[in-house]
Image: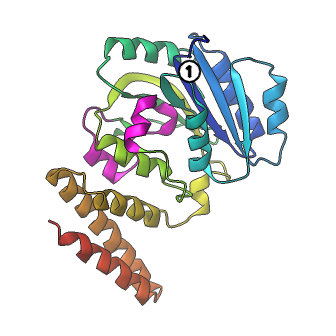
Amino acid sequence: MEQKPFFSIIIPTYDRKDFLKIALGSVLKQTFSDYEAIVVDDGSTDNTKEIVKALKNKKLNYFYQKNKGPAAARNKGIKKANGKFICFLDSDDRFCREKLEITHQYIKQYPNYKVFHTEEIWYRNGRLLSEKKYHKKPAGHVFTQALKLCCISPSTTVIKRSVFSKIGLFDSNLPVCEDYDLFLRLTSKYPVFLIPKHLTIKEGGHSDQQSKKYPSIDTFRIYALEKILKNGKLSNTDYLATYRELKQKCTIYIKGAIKRNKLKEANEYRRLIAKYKKNL
């Protein structure tokens, strides 16, 4: 019987052959070898497939699908994964060489945790960004922090595979903010362990980032907030915090809708605020 790998690294990609080479290079140079890497090609029109196949590495598994977005690509990777723990790596990011080795040490040291993430290093247009206070990653029960912004980055995250049977997969209805939605569901149920080391390198500022295609991403965050309010599984404290965040985001959106003379849209978001206020 073939032994299952400890880690499955899921790498969704779409027309990023040059970034993908760097991402895969960082995976294949890991100091810890008990892993598989799953590249999910989300309908690329460049030579992504040839780049992966040319590496001729048994640890690399390539899967193609028609373009469905990052949520569907990650979900396909999760379904194909054999590892005990799932790592995510966006194709424009990369791992430090000891990412898996250090993460494995912490998992063994803290076996009660099922969710881990790390600090990260940010580059924008090739320049190192200085770390701000809000870049500091949270630890423990971080649901209220996750409401405000994406305080957990997919490329820093390692999650026990069994967790997805409890919280579900990424929401493929979301073209962006699919990570925000998933991490709300995740952090409402599980504490998060922060590995206090910078083990992921992120590259921002390039033109094909998914979020740049959608100027008003708060509509997708409101969708995610309503989803988790609707499921009825939040504690009273978390429900109140979620409602307040929903109200704040809706109020901002309503003001913008009124300026654009979209009064019907503004009324829909007013009704949304009223709907969940009733349950307080």
Q: Is residue 58 magenta?
A: no
Q: Which residue is mark 1?
A: 96
In the picture, measured across the screen, residue 93 lies left or right of residue 17, that is left
Q: Nearer the viewer, residue 234 or 213?
A: 234
Give the quadrant of the N terminus: top right
Q: Quadrant of residue 159?
A: top left
Q: How is the image coloured?
A: rainbow
In the picture, measured across the screen, residue 197 lies left or right of residue 189, that is right
In the image, what residue occupies the spot 24% across and 63% down? 243
Q: Please, which residue is most extreme toward the front here?
A: 1
Give the quadrant of the C terminus: bottom left
Q: Is residue 152 magenta?
A: yes
Magenta stretch, residue numbers: 138-167
Mark 1 residue type: Cys
Counting from the top left corner in percent of width and height, residue 160 is at: 42, 27
Q: Quadrant of residue 35?
A: top right
Counting from the top left corner in percent of width and height, residue 26 is at: 64, 22
Q: Nearer the viewer, residue 60 or 79?
A: 79
Q: Is residue 160 visible?
A: no
From what the image shows, is residue 267 above or below residue 226? below
Q: Residues within 10 Å of mark 1 (few under 14, many from 20)?
A: some
Q: Secondary structure at mark 1?
A: loop
From what the image shows, is residue 52 above or below residue 133? above
